[in-house]
Amino acid sequence: MILTIVFILGESWINQLVVEQWRGRLVALYGSSYALSQLAGPLLLGVVGSEDDLGFWIGAGLLIAAPLVLLGRDGAPSAESCSVTFTDLFGFCRRLPVIAWAIALFAAFEAMILTLLPVYCLQQGFTTEIALFMVSTVVVGDALLQLPIGALADRMSRRTLFSGCAVMLLGSSLAIPLLLQTPLIWPLWVLFGASAGGLFTLSLVLIGERYRDDALVRANAHVAQLWGIGCLIGPLAAGGGSQWISGHALPLFMAAGAFGLVLLARRPDAFEPAPV
């Protein structure tokens, strides 16, 4: 609950502060930092070990020390005390369905990569070490290619770039079962992670274009709601599908989600909020 508040306010603060010509790059920097932190935690635990509680105390110390960096900072969005209901969420999804779909899809992607991708790789005959390397490759692709995507977002149409990431995610998802047992799977994992991460970064950028202050905080609260829904539904659907439908349910689930996103992005008003 507390971390969700941190995410909502942090993403709102970033989008409130940045100037428009730097929005893509700075939001992408946030996305890269987020993805790299997912790698840093397990790496740190690997260094300090899990035989005692040192890792726990290091994590607690980082959580305590991090807010000190914010002392004396200003520019955070002003927001009224309010409640954000699921009715409000439905209104947000109706106004910006392509962004809502992209956020939920990326949340499902992230949850599945961290939980089900190692299992998927083991089921396809890879060793534990190779399976973990594959997960790391996806996360590294997500982290390292966000900055180029953010730079492009400041120099070209963000709608076109968003659609390109959706098409790339669709193509890479469909190619995974075909190339899984070949050396080409390694660059494909990078594209898979980068295209999914790019959708989330661009969604935050597009939200930042439209909203300020209270409306921006509300929009990011809806992002957090959609994130929770995607994290819940994605692993359940992919896990059930892998058991009852196909061993390749995970990439096929992502392909289906990306295909829906491509169709939504083709609508003429896909990136323009519908009238309330």
Image (spheres, rainbow, N blue to C red):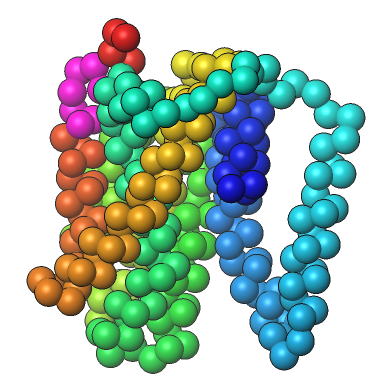
Number of marks:
0
Whether residue 254 is visible here, answered yes or no, is: yes
Left or right of 70, for residue 237: left
Q: Residue at x 47, y 27 (%)?
A: 84
Q: Residue at x 75, y 65 (%)?
A: 59
Q: Residue at x 64, y 47 (%)?
A: 2
Residue at the extreme left: 245
Q: Quadrant of residue 91?
A: top left
* Front-lying residue, 137 or 55: 55
In this picture, is 63 found above or below 262? Answer: below
Q: Quadrant of residue 60?
A: bottom right
Residue 197: % across, % down? 44, 48
Left or right of 115, for residue 77: right
Residue 126: % across, % down? 33, 88
Residue 72: % across, % down? 89, 30
Left or right of 201, for residue 9: right
Residue 36 drawn in magenta: no
In this picture, is 20 found above or below 223? Answer: above
Residue 270 drawn in magenta: yes
Dominant secondary structure, magenta:
loop
Whether residue 30 is visible here, answered yes or no, is: no
Residue 66: % across, % down? 80, 49
Q: Which residues are magenta?
A: 264-272
Residue at the extreme top: 275
Image quarter where the C terminus lies is top left
Q: Residue at x 40, y 65 (%)?
A: 113
Left or right of 44, for residue 159: left
* Front-lying residue, 165 or 118: 118
In this picture, is 184 found above or below 173? Answer: below
* Front-lying residue, 159 or 46: 46
